[in-house]
């Protein structure tokens, strides 16, 4: 019995020595960062309105001043254009407009020919011609690679005939367009 008691006292003494030893807290820690990269595309226009000098003697009226700038971190994209006029002209045609909106009376008229818009090629981006701009987006540009602030040039063309009506003072011909970029 003495032997067992001695062994038991020895284990208790050893446990007390182990507990009384130096205690150290961790002085370093580790962490890691992580994330996922999402699709990032953007479009901007250099102006909100372009002027077309409408004259049957100088037809078609042309304007190349609208610049579109796109960025895309995906290998392909489409820039579409659509006629976003809530009311007014027949789809794709410049219609009678005043500061109060499109006019149905007394002078409900459109130009006789639709507005045409063309995009020009730029490196990996292909421009297309849209001859009749509808309420549904139509491809104006198709991009074949990742781009960062890529400028894209456009050309507006409006045929004018002698049959087009001269509007009274305070009225003008107008169409509202919306440009959208989407990944392919």
Image: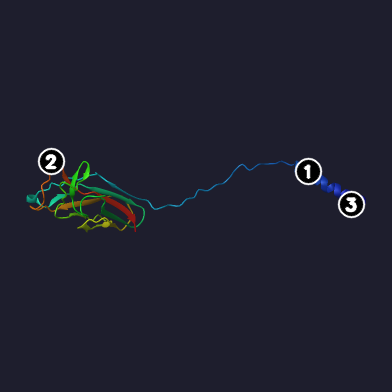
* Residue under pointer 1: 17
Q: Name which residue lies at 18% across and 49% down.
A: 95
Q: Residues within 10 Å of mark 3 (few under 14, many from 20)?
A: few
In the image, 48: left or right of 8? Answer: left
* Residue under pointer 2: 169
Q: Please, which residue is most extreme toward the front here?
A: 106
Q: CA distance from mark 2 to mark 3?
A: 118 Å
In the image, 32: left or right of 113? Answer: right
Q: CA distance from mark 3 to mark 1?
A: 20 Å
User: Residue 81 placed where, x, y %?
Assistant: 26, 54
* Quarter of the rendering containing residue 112: bottom left
Residue 4 numbered tag: 3
- Dot 3 falls on a residue whose secondary structure is helix
Q: Nearer the viewer, residue 48 or 118?
A: 48
Q: Nearer the viewer, residue 54 or 156?
A: 54
From the viewer's perspective, is the residue at label 2 or at label 3 nearer? 2
Q: Name which residue lies at 86% across and 49% down.
A: 8
Q: Residues within 10 Å of mark 1 (few under 14, many from 20)?
A: few
User: Residue 150 placed where, x, y %?
Assistant: 28, 50
Quadrant in the picture for the C terminus: bottom left
- Dot 1 falls on a residue whose secondary structure is helix
- Dot 2 falls on a residue whose secondary structure is loop
Q: Nearer the viewer, residue 139 or 177?
A: 177
**Which is nearer the N-term, disc 2 or disc 1?**
1
Q: How many marks?
A: 3
User: Residue 50 placed where, x, y %?
Assistant: 19, 45
Q: CA distance from mark 2 to mark 1?
A: 104 Å
Question: In the picture shown, does residue 133 fall above or below 53?
Answer: below
């Amino acid at each position: 019995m003495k032997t067992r008691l001695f062994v038991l006292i020895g284990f208790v003494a050893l446990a007390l020595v182990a507990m009384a030893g130096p205690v150290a807290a961790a002085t370093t820690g580790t962490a890691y960062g992580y994330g996922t990269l999402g699709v990032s595309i953007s479009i901007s226009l250099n102006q909100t309105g372009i002027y077309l000098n409408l004259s049957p003697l100088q037809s078609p009226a042309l304007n190349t001043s609208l610049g579109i700038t796109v960025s895309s971190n995906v290998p392909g994209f489409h820039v579409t254009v659509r006629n976003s006029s809530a009311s007014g002209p027949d789809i794709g045609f410049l219609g009678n407009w005043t500061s109060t909106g499109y006019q149905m009376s007394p002078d409900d008229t459109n130009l006789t020919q639709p507005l045409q818009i063309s995009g020009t090629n730029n490196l990996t981006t292909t421009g297309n011609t849209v001859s009749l701009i509808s309420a549904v987006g139509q491809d104006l540009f198709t991009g074949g690679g990742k781009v960062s602030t890529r400028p894209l040039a456009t050309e507006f063309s409006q045929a004018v005939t002698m049959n087009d009506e001269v509007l009274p003072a305070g009225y003008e011909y107008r169409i509202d367009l919306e440009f959208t970029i989407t990944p392919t």
